[in-house]
Amino acid sequence: MFGVVPKALWERNTPADDRNRIHLAMRPLLIRGERTLLIDAGVGDKENEKFAEIYGLDRACTLETTMAEAGLTAEDVDLVVATHLHFDHAGGFTIRDATGRVRPAFPNARYIVRRGEWRMRRILTSGIARPT
């Protein structure tokens, strides 16, 4: 998480577990007004249990449950903004339906992402080329 910063400099304030994982919160930002705007959506729930165990995901509290506590459903979101397309920010933009197909998690929303971020993600997932 801290890149090239030596562990000795951060572990006192952010202790790691026995697998060298640290506790992090993923808190999408929901803004209500004339429209309902969601900025980022966390990891989501499409990944398997092995993935959840590797990253130490706590799925006790989901975006869906916290939105419900605020009196909202996925259908109420008008606009979804991605700060960037890493899995921990954009994984919740899509869900698997009953047939296993991936579909938008917020069906009535317009999704917005920076053009450069979209292009980079397309390159990285195409298998054709890698940016230098």
Image (spheres, helix red, strand yellow):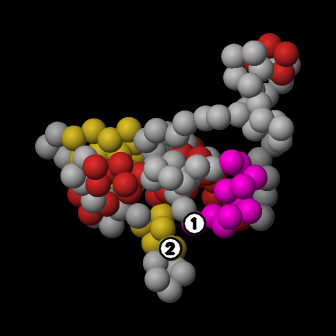
Which of 30 and 56 lies nearest the eye of the viewer?
Answer: 56
Q: Which residue is mark 1?
A: 46
Q: Residue at x 54, y 62 (%)?
A: 45
Marks 2 and 1, how far apart at CA: 6 Å
For mark 2, give the secondary structure: strand
Instruction: First in sequence, mark 2 or 1: give its number.
Output: 1
Q: Position of residue 14 (x, y in %)?
A: 70, 23
> Residue 84: image x %, image y %?
55, 42
Q: Is 53 positioned to the left or the right of 68 in the image? A: right
Q: Give the labeled residue for mark 2.
A: 96
Label of residue 86 in the image = none
Q: Considering only vertical position in the picture, is 117 above or below 101?
A: above
- Within 10 Å of disc 1 (Cα), the crowding (few <14, some 14-19, many 20+) is some
State the residue lying farthest toward the bottom.
Answer: 99
42 within the magenta span: no
Q: Amino acid at mark 2?
A: Arg
The boundaries of the magenta stretch are 46-56
What residue sits 74% from the left and 25% below the top? 15
Q: Main secondary structure of the magenta part?
A: helix
Left or right, residue 58 beside residue 128:
left
